[in-house]
Amino acid sequence: MNLKQLAYFVRVVELRNMTHAAESLHVAQPALSQQMALLEDDVGVALLVRRPRGVEPTVEGQLLYRQAQTILRQVDSIHSILTRKADPVSGAVSVAMASSTARILALPLIRAVRQRYPAIELEIVDIPSADLPLAIQQGRVDISLPPDEENSSSLSTTPLVVEELLVLAHPSVALPRTRLSITDLADIPLILPRPPNKLRMRIDYAFMNARLRYQLLAQASTSAILLPAVSEGLGVTILPYSAAYKEIHTGAIKAYHLTPSLSRKISLCTSKSAPDRPAVTAVIELIRSLTQGLIDDGTWRHCELA
């Protein structure tokens, strides 16, 4: 087993297609297939299942994929540290965030990194919020922006922003007032984040505290699925402004406040065991300054710095 084989394997798993992986790696497909066969012989288990339309990782393949990501990231970190004299702010930096946060922050961050630190290779990882702390713990990303994350022995957690949770509905949905109570939502079909999800936990607790049950029409792991359903008038959801700020601005979705209000706290998370890297520090500072700027200019509403 060597680093080249691990890099090849990661690309095959990501693309789920040997031909596409070979093209992206600029190697011949037979050579790539041979390297995967040698890797499987070396570890002694099947890592990939060949199917007519591509390949899928086995259970063992999924385990190796996660470990390989960590190993390759650590190697890249070592390379950045050793070549620091040439360009102190360079290398790959990955930032994981929920799709609701990515809607408002990802593009400004990409633009700012390109302008300020062109030697940084930025990766935005959009994953369900429940997986954000695990992504850091497993070494899959450098920075994570999880909601309502508690301090732990392995993670360095700094509060970033507190967001109010809003009721989001299509304009055709008749709601009684602009400031709603949980009782107002009891008879309305809801489309909510799928557990495990801390935002969903807050919603469940609010209904339980009011001794009410809600009508669950559907649930999904990301707001990228929830919002189109709301935009079509299929149901109502509860999310922060950042998740639907474009649709709210155009009038495709109407936002309502809750009384008493619900909120969530987004934090900046890094691993305490990760080596200090100027590129990671630079991206963290950009995230902080961008968040401040988006709040100050009114783009990121119904929230405040934590």
Image (cartoon, helix red, strand yellow):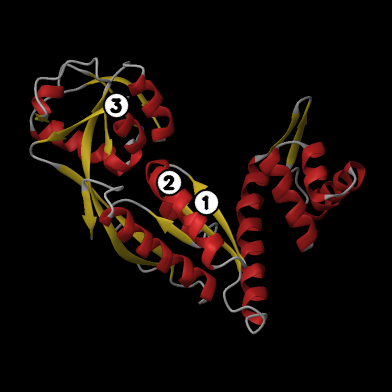
Residue 203 coordinates in the image, percent (x, y): 21, 35
Please state, as top left, top right, bottom left or bottom right, where the N terminus lies in the image. Answer: bottom right
Q: Are marks 2 and 1 in contact (CB under 8 Å)?
A: yes
The quadrant where residue 22 appears: top right
Q: Amino acid at mark 2?
A: Ala
The quadrant where residue 68 appears: bottom right
Answer few, some or many: residues within 10 Å of disc 2's Cα (few below 14, many 20 plus, some between 14 and 19).
Answer: many
Q: Is residue 55 above or below residue 159?
A: above
Answer few, some or many: residues within 10 Å of disc 1's Cα (few below 14, many 20 plus, some between 14 and 19).
Answer: some
**Residue occupying the far bottom of the picture:** 85
Q: Amino acid at mark 3?
A: Gly
Mark closer to the chain start, 2 or 1: 2
Q: Which residue is mark 2?
A: 102
Answer few, some or many: residues within 10 Å of disc 3's Cα (few below 14, many 20 plus, some between 14 and 19).
Answer: few
Residue 136 coordinates in the image, percent (x, y): 47, 59
Q: Which residue is mark 3?
A: 251
Q: Amino acid at mark 1?
A: Ile
Label number found at residue 141: none
Q: CA distance from mark 2 to mark 3?
A: 21 Å
* Residue nearest the viewer, comparing 14 with 297: 297
Q: CA distance from mark 2 to mark 1?
A: 8 Å
Is 91 on the left-hand or right-hand side of 138? right
| Front position among marks 1 and 3 | 3
Instruction: Report if residue 156 is visible in the image.
Output: yes
Is 296 on the left-hand or right-hand side of 225? left
Mark closer to the chain start, 1 or 3: 1
Q: Which residue is mark 1?
A: 124
Q: Residue at x 31, y 66 (%)?
A: 158
Secondary structure type for disc 1: strand
Secondary structure type for disc 3: loop
